[in-house]
Amino acid sequence: MGSDANPLLFASAKFPFGQLTRHPGPRNGKPMNLYGPTSCSYISQRLRLHYVDWGNPEAPPLILQHGGRDHCRSWDWVAEELQQDWHVIAPDLRGHGDSAWSPEGHYAMDAFVYDFAQLVHTLGYDQVTIIAHSLGGNIASRYSGLYPEKVRKLVNIEGLGPSPEIREQIEAESRADRLRKWIEDRRKAAGRIPRRYSSIEAAFARMKEENAHLSDEQARHLTAHGTSRNEDGTWSWKFDNYLNVWSPTDIPYADQEALWEAITCPILLLYGTDSWASNPEKDGRIRHFRDARVIEYANAGHWLHHDQFDKFVADVKAFL
């Protein structure tokens, strides 16, 4: 397999991301292959979108879908654990990682769901298993309701969108008010220059600030694959600023619930006790799923698959 790791990241003794060898993983000390997976691409709505393939093509397919402002290489530790039994595919959403950015900044849910459906179609899978986080979980849940026969099992990590309470607040605003705010926010995003960090160490520090649960090893790896170097030598994150402006239009909430109710595969819903996300067992959304189980993780935030890696892997292996 080839590596898509940036060699510039390994040139600094001050900030050693590691060498191109096997080294201990984030929590359990098992060796991790830094040569990494093979980078591939596919076309969706005229965009060239990126995914990585961890090999083992004779095994059943497993798609790992990241969340908002993240990237496919944030799944590396999970992929390492599962690649012996699964053909692991991890895509970058449009506007994220090494996927193309939408020229018009179109990042509505319909676009994301189409891209996901196009990935499955392009790869020719009759049925897939999915592990998805946050925005990725929302996308995967909608896909599973649209094409229930295509999904064998789904692990959804805090990916059902806003809680019913927050959703009511959003829908209490008129469509006109939401559209006016969207226009204003889009104009602001158009004038915003991507944040530039003077060094990779500064980007690493921001990563640690964003999630205090991360180990230094995890934060270094996520920063290495989540940034690119600008022409002037500074560093920026690999996501489009327009992602910060949510589309003012979406299918009605009742239609989202109907898609959840159409899912026929078993679902594992995972939530962190230190996260902002609302537990569906507590807010009532669990009633919309035919075959779903919720597990809550202590001492874990929104990225619980990083924060409680060993427990997460054990629960996922048992479920799958």
Image (cartoon, helix red, strand yellow):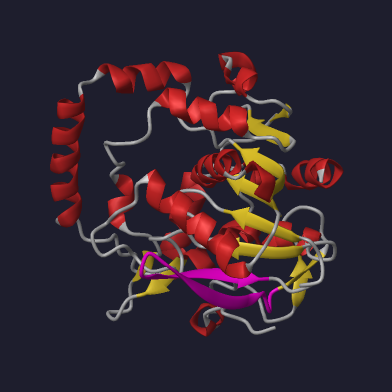
Main SS category, magenta section? strand
Question: Does residue 15 show up?
Answer: yes
| Number of numbered discs visible in the structure rendering | 0
In the image, residue 13 above or below residue 74:
below
Q: In which quadrant of the rendered view does residue 194 lie?
A: bottom left
In the displayed structure image, the side of residue 132 where residue 226 appears, left or right: left
Percent across and percent down for residue 40 are 56, 76
Q: Nearer the viewer, residue 289 or 16?
A: 289
In the displayed structure image, the side of residue 48 where residue 77 appears, left or right: right
Question: Does residue 276 show up?
Answer: no
In the image, residue 207 above or below residue 121:
above
At 71% from the left and 64% from the top, the residue drawn is 88
In the displayed structure image, the side of residue 146 where residue 94 appears, left or right: left
Percent across and percent down for residue 46 are 36, 70
At 27% from the left and 57% from the top, the residue drawn is 105
Query: Which residues are drawn in magenta?
Result: 34-53
Q: In which quadrant of the rendered view does residue 292 lie?
A: top right
Q: Nearer the viewer, residue 13 or 153?
A: 153
In the displayed structure image, the side of residue 275 where residue 21 appears, left or right: right
At 51% from the left and 75% from the top, the residue drawn is 41
Percent across and percent down for residue 311 are 79, 41
Task: Tell whether position 264 is magenta.
Answer: no
Q: Nearer the viewer, residue 101 or 6?
A: 101
At 51% from the left and 45% from the top, the residue drawn is 139
Q: Nearer the viewer, residue 58 or 156?
A: 58
Percent across and percent down for residue 182 are 20, 39
Looking at the figure, which quarter contains the N terminus?
bottom right
